Amino acid sequence: MARFLRPLLRGTTYTRFLHLWVPMLIVSVWLWVEMSLPWVPALVLIPVGLIPAVRRGEGVQARLLLTPGEQGTEISVEPSATWRDRLRTVLWLEARMVLGGVVGVATVWLPALSYTLAELAYGRVPEFPVLNEATPHWAFALLVPIPLVAFYGLVVGLGELITMLAHRLLGPSPAERLAALEERTEQLMERTRIAQELHDSIGHALTVAVVQAGAARAAGDPVFTDRALEAIEETGRTALEDLERVLGVLRESKRPVSSRPTLTDADRLLESARVSGAKVDAELTGPLDTVPGPVSREGYRILQESLTNVLRHAGAVPVRVRVTVGDGTLDLAVRNPLTAAIPGPGRGNGLRGIRERAALLGGRARTGPDEGDWQVHVELPLR
């Protein structure tokens, strides 16, 4: 019994009833003007439903009255973009008018029927059609609740039906679903990229700081210590700039990425590695300033992560860096002597991030031991 009466306590039941009644207001006005042509409003709805903005208005109404307070409802609030959307809107308007007509008739006649049965039970002869010739009797009191229960069930049932139709006829079209999926994918990719940016930038800064601090403590040389502190300061300042930029991207989704470092800023990475004790032999060949922005930015991060791995796992060892801008390809290679501390292929977030960056641009990356060295070799297409 409690489950049966539960819809009476839900505000949705009454907002859906109001939604079903709205078309009847329009029809009532028309019938007041011209009673002999009741089908005219349904005919007028056909060209009205073809107007793109009508779908948005119907979607807003449906969300507010049929699914109030629900998150992620499958009812679109976008205007019609295709003829299929327009036809679905026409069907929705016609279905809404038909169901509204049923509710309108039931709202008038079913309560009136209960009242008539109550009159018969009281001993009065009603003027209600069909029952105006019935003989009054107290037993009619037992029938009084039936029309009201029927009216209650009709309102709840048609409310559920109109909501289901709203999801089917006003729901997102395949194009809208695809656009939403693409937007969600872009958001996930952006979150992954930001996480990788923080990993590369902050990881590099912390690695340089740890290596420099350890080397300064072991050296016991005031001059070397001053140089190490300067390197730590410069690396920390750069990391703070990167952090502020990434946080700015999070705060402002439309903020351009042109401020991100590119391969033209590779000298500061190489100098940071040299100050940390690594013997860097670098050769940058070709016009780096002509490399497309996305490729140059990802190439910078790949070089940064490669040098970070060297400092973190191998320490102050000779490093060979080769960056070549060729015919349609950016070739980036970082090699250093292999040590036992270096992880095997496929391990570590940094190496996985390098491969993901390369794959995202349609390139390829090889990481792992090679002829006694540890290598990171990346090829990125420029087109």
Image (cartoon, grey):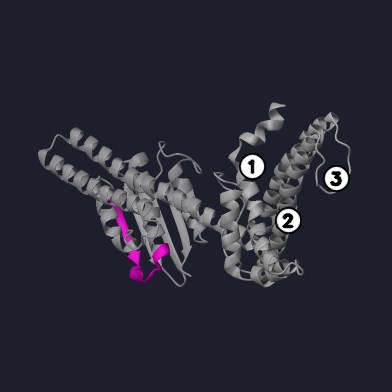
**Rendered position, 220 above or below 289:** above
Determine which quarter of the picture holds residue 38.
bottom right
- Badge count: 3
Is any atom of residue 275 visible in this view? no
Q: Which tag is nearer the camera, tag 3 or tag 2?
A: 3
Relative depth, front residue between 41 and 113: 113
- The answer to which of marks 1 and 2 sits earlier in the sequence is 1
Choose between 75 and 46: the one closer to the eye.
46
Type of amino acid under label 2: Gly
Inter-mark Cα distance, 3 to 2: 26 Å
Q: Which residues are magenta?
A: 279-295
| Residue that mark 2 sits on | 101
| N-terminal-most mark, 3 or 2 | 2
| Residue 377 visible in this rendered orientation of the protein | yes
Please, what is the three-letter code of the amino acid marked with disc 1? Thr
Q: Which of the two discs, 1 and 3, labels the residue nearer the N terminus? A: 1
For the N terminus, give its image quadrant.
Answer: top right
Q: Identify the element where label 1 is drawn.
A: helix
Residue 141, image x, y percentages = 80, 31
**Which class describes the residues within 10 Å of circle 3: few (<14), some (14-19), or many (20+)?**
some
> Which dot marks residue 13?
1
Q: Position of residue 321 (x, y in %)?
A: 35, 56
Q: Residue 147 at x, y = what percent?
A: 78, 39
Q: Is residue 320 above or below residue 132?
A: below
At 31% across and 53% down in the image, what residue appears? Answer: 245
Q: Nearer the viewer, residue 370 or 331?
A: 331
Q: Which residue is mark 3?
A: 132
